[in-house]
Image (cartoon, grey):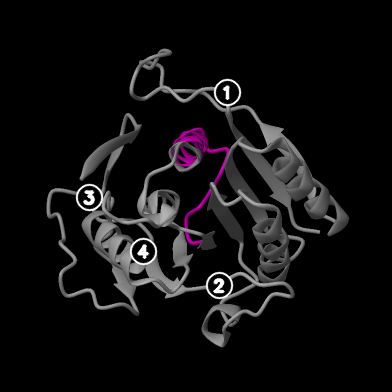
Amino acid sequence: MTDIPISAAMNIIINTATDSNESGTTVWEGGVALARHLAAESAKKKVDLKGKSCIDLGSGTGIVGIVCAKLGAEVLLTDIDHPAILAILTKNAGQNILSSKSNANSSDSAINPTLAEAAGTATILPLEWDSPARIPTEIASKGPFDIIVGADVVYSMETVVKLVDTIEALSDRRTDIWIGHEHRDPRVSAHFLELMKEKGFKSRSVKRTNPASASEGDVNYIGDHVALYRFKGK
């Protein structure tokens, strides 16, 4: 269990599974960076999540979607239908968001009474990306979404194609899309941006900042290998 500082007004508690081989049970820097940026932009009134429909793709531990819910969004947390990932996601949502629900067994989801109740809500559903996209009715009926977020979801040539098709299926021209990305393979990064462009999404790189108290070498510092992208629906 890790207490992660998001802003001066918000910390969240995240559980991970060190004994799992699934990447979705680990906290990645792209998620932390995106969560902090959205919280900072919300505090500056530059981003308004209150009452907005939001889907978090490849939620993993749920850090980005949970922060969106605490900022007022009605969030759908999604990831592959894997017991270890859904269990961690359910537990983290339960500890940070009092108004959360899941299709997974959540009887062991601890609720931390010391945490402020989220302004929004979070629902957990499994979602497998595919090309062409195959969106379950329960998710499709909630779209198109006002906001789509995804962190550390750009990691292979094959999954990028499925991810972009999934984003297209869940969005319209009003949708605000935020991606937190840790650069690993430049070919994959370039392919993702090119595919989004081909689908008609307009993008821009987002300048992010580390917490004022963080400096290189500090546990809260995230280097330039992590980038944030914002897309507008086509």
Q: Which residue is under mark 4? A: 85
User: Against 223, is 127 above or below?
Assistant: below
Q: CA distance from mark 4 to mark 1?
A: 28 Å
From the image, state whether disc 3 or disc 4 is nearer to you: 4
Specify few, some or many for label 2: CA neighbours under 10 Å numbering under 14, 14-19, or 20 or more.
Answer: some
Q: CA distance from mark 3 to mark 2?
A: 32 Å
Q: Find out whether the residues at labels 2 and 1 contact each other: C-beta distance under 8 Å.
A: no
Residue kind at label 2, given as amino acid type: Glu
Q: Which residue is under mark 3? A: 116
Q: CA distance from mark 2 to mark 1?
A: 30 Å
* Kind of element beneath mark 1: loop
Percent from the top left, x then y, of residue 201? Answer: 80, 53
Q: Which quadrant would the C terminus be assigned to in this image?
A: bottom right
Residue kind at label 4, given as amino acid type: Ile
Q: Residue furthest bottom?
A: 137
User: Against 79, is 178 above or below?
Assistant: above
Specify few, some or many for label 1: CA neighbours under 10 Å numbering under 14, 14-19, or 20 or more.
Answer: few
Q: Find out whether the residues at labels 4 and 2 contact each other: C-beta distance under 8 Å.
A: no
Q: Which quadrant would the N terminus be assigned to in this image?
A: top left
Specify few, some or many for label 4: CA neighbours under 10 Å numbering under 14, 14-19, or 20 or more.
Answer: many
The residue at 63%/27% (across/down) is: 207
Q: Which residues are magenta?
A: 33-53
113 left or right of 19 in image: left
Question: Along the polypeptide, which appears first: circle 3 or circle 2?
Answer: 3
Residue kind at label 3, given as amino acid type: Ala
Percent from the top left, x then y, of residue 33? Answer: 48, 35
Instruction: Please give the label number shown on residue 128.
Output: 2
Q: Nearer the viewer, residue 191 or 224?
A: 191
Q: CA distance from mark 4 to mark 2?
A: 13 Å
Q: Which residue is under mark 1? A: 224
The residue at 28%/58% (across/down) is: 97
Q: CA distance from mark 3 to mark 4?
A: 25 Å
